Amino acid sequence: MKYPTIDSSLFTLNRKNFTKQLKNNSLAIFNSSDEFPRSGDQSFVFKQNPDLFYLSGIDQEQTILLLYPDCPNPLYREVLFLRQTNDYIKVWEGYKYTKEQAKAASGIETIYWLEDFDNILHSIVNYAEHIYLNTNENDRYAHEVPYRDVRFIEKMRVKYPLHHYERSAPIMRGLRAVKSDIEIELTKQACSITRDAFIRVLKFTKPGVKEYEIEAEIIHEFIRQGGTGHAYTPIIASGHNANILHYNDNNQQCKEGDVILFDFGAEYANYNADMSRSIPVSGRFTKRQKEVYNAVLHVMKQSVKLIGEGTVWNNYHEQVGEIMTEQLVNLGLISLEDVKKQSPAYPAYKKYFMHGTSHHLGIDVHDFAGRYTPFAVGNILTVEPGIYIPEEGLGIRLENNILITTNGNVDLMADIPLEAEEIEEIMNS
């Protein structure tokens, strides 16, 4: 692993908080992610199941976590099952956890090899009343391929049909949204790496460079500083490309007079940053570009003020829509008549700002949290308004990561250049 060992107290506390919410005499099982084929003889880079990582800190394939706090045999109240290494694996794949390393990383004392899982589970499962199993219940996810958790559920129901099966996801949804101090520090590190990559890009960008050349500068800085890589596929969208919300071809030349919309973030120790910026290829915004830029910046700053403990998601987005509407009228993009005639289901501002303003951030970039749960202290949220004007070949999006605290909001990206004049100054220094 590229990152230093995380304090195992984080994962010990996470398990304690999870098991407190189980029904009496319950057993819970979490599986690692699948390994997905990339080609005839390669797999994609492994990405751990975020729930398993949250509860164990184990960043390795073919891992199972078993939690049974009421188990009659104390030995099996917390058990971690790992893929056993051997001389062949050492030569061809390298590092795998030893039992002692897994104990240190997770805070779990009982470690077995994966081959022992079926026998140990069978020896205790019939004493449990409830079995908690996990699936991906993120609102943004819809699966076509039956991934490991789904296959495991089918296997368990066939083998143990008369147990009461429960969902772990509702518990995880509540826990993962509120970040601990350690998680906040890991997110701050991801934001710091992202900052340095952006400043590097500001000094590198000029007319004639390719979008993928800029992408190369970003990943260079991420890897150089011990980041795992990109938190998500980066968007380097120059000119008209900025009006494609999920543009990631990143293969066009950046032309003088255009604006580049960036959306990228570093992943560090499985925690993520998520930043958007828009910069002028030539180093100076035109008057119109700066007008649009400052309108987005105004919406961003006002949106941050609306976020706080108790804020309700839908109400928040409605308020942001009102702020954005005012800016679009000022820019001449919509009229007061348009606003008067707008449909409540599709307000006039949606023509130029069609996505949400915020999402939770954590182990997942769009982190697991309740859509209808009021914001709380410890939440980390993005704030990312944008204005997209296809007829002008211009798209502007700005995004920072905001932590809600008892003493107000903390901008985890406050040290990343944001004001138009600051960006111009760095680009021309």
Image (tube, grey):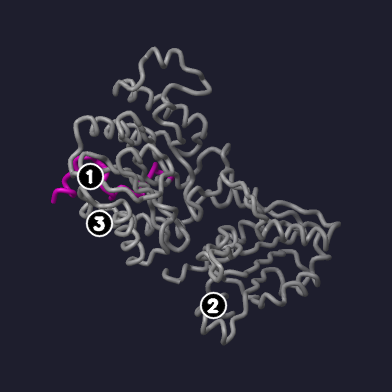
Q: Position of residue 209 (x, y in %)?
A: 24, 52
Label 2 secondary element: loop
Left or right: 181 in relation to 336: right
Above or below: residue 2 compared with residue 132 = below
Mark nearer the N terminus (2 vs 3) = 2
Q: Nearer the viewer, residue 130 or 19?
A: 130
What residue would you read off at disc 2? 96
Q: Position of residue 405 (x, y in %)?
A: 43, 46
Q: Position of residue 152 (x, y in %)?
A: 72, 61
Amino acid type, mark 2: Lys
Mark nearer the N terminus (2 vs 1) = 2
* Quadrant in the picture for residue 382: top left
Left or right: 353 in relation to 152: left
Q: Nearer the viewer, residue 255 or 75?
A: 255
Q: Which residues are magenta?
A: 404-429
Amino acid type, mark 3: Arg
Mark nearer the N terminus (3 vs 1) = 3
Crowding near pointer 3: few (<14 within 10 Å), some, many (20+)?
A: some
Of the numbered discs in the image, which one, if any, rests on residue 111?
Answer: none
Asked whether the beta carbons under mark 2 and mark 3 sit within 8 Å of each other, the answer is no
Crowding near pointer 2: few (<14 within 10 Å), some, many (20+)?
A: some
What residue would you read off at disc 1? 281
- Dot in front, 2 or 1: 1
Above or below: residue 220 compared with residue 389 = below
